[in-house]
Image (spheres, rainbow, N blue to C red):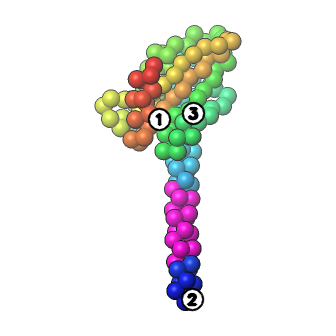
Amino acid sequence: MMFVGLLIVVLVAAIGIVWWRVWHRKRALQLLIRRGHSITDTQVAAAMAALGAAAPAASLPVADVWGHGIMAFAYTVADPQAKLTRAAVAAALSEQAQAAGFTPLSPRYAPFEVTDWWQRGGETHFDVAYVANAATSEYVGDVAKVS
């Protein structure tokens, strides 16, 4: 009887420890993504200003469902007067990142990569990845293979 009670206590403690570690990891990833989101928003707003375009009103994480700390965010610019191109936005992001002192994680990618681009209904939609960790770097590589 004593053995069964001890076994239950050990089992409950093990489940509690595993749950705490999973919760702690999810919280750390959320904080990482939130910080990356803020940094990316600032850089995108500066790049849009440099291009003479309106700053995106809001942005959303694109890849948070993966659960690996991928920092990629979707933007929409509703400025039909701005003649934005993917190359121009990528160049402006690169210049802003360099001016702000960001260094690339790897020589393959810039600190901020435009991973998707489309125009619809007078709006320009694009995704930007903040390549600050290995998971985001792998994500950018995977998206490039599909594109």
Which segment is the magenta one?
A: 10-25
Q: Nearer the viewer, mark 1 or mark 3?
A: 3
At a point 52% along the width and 34% down the height, the residue shown is 72
> For the N terminus, which image quadrant?
bottom right
Furthest toward the bottom, the residue is 2
Which disc number belongs to residue 62?
A: 3
- Whole-angstrom CA distance, mark 1 to mark 3, is 12 Å
> Is the stretch drawn in magenta largely helix, strand or loop?
helix
Q: Earlier in the sequence, mark 1 or mark 3?
A: 3
Residue bearing the label numbered 2: 1
Mark before the other along the chain sequence, 2 or 1: 2
- Estimate the x, y position of residue 129 in percent, counting from the top left: 48, 32
Instruction: Identify the amino acid type marked 1.
Output: Tyr
How many labels were placed on the picture? 3
Please, what is the three-letter code of the amino acid marked with disc 3?
Val
Q: Which residue is mark 1?
A: 130
Q: Nearer the viewer, residue 122 or 6?
A: 6
Q: From the top left corner, tell me how far across and down residue 43 is, in percent.
A: 52, 32
- Residue ID at (58%, 29%): 74
Dot 3 or dot 2: first in sequence order is: 2
55 above or below 60? Answer: above
On the image, the x and y values in percent for residue 44 come to 54, 28
Task: Measure the alpha-carbon separation of dots 3 and 2.
Answer: 53 Å
Residue 130 visible within the image: yes
Marks 1 and 3 in Cβ contact (< 8 Å) = no
Toward the left, the furthest residue is 107
> Is residue 36 visible to the viewer in this orientation of the structure?
no
- Which quadrant does the C terminus fall into? top left
Question: Which circle, 2 or 1, is nearer the viewer?
Answer: 2
Asked if the stretch drawn in magenta spans residue 135, the answer is no
**Residue 15 lies within the magenta run:** yes
Which class describes the residues within 10 Å of circle 1: few (<14), some (14-19), or many (20+)? many
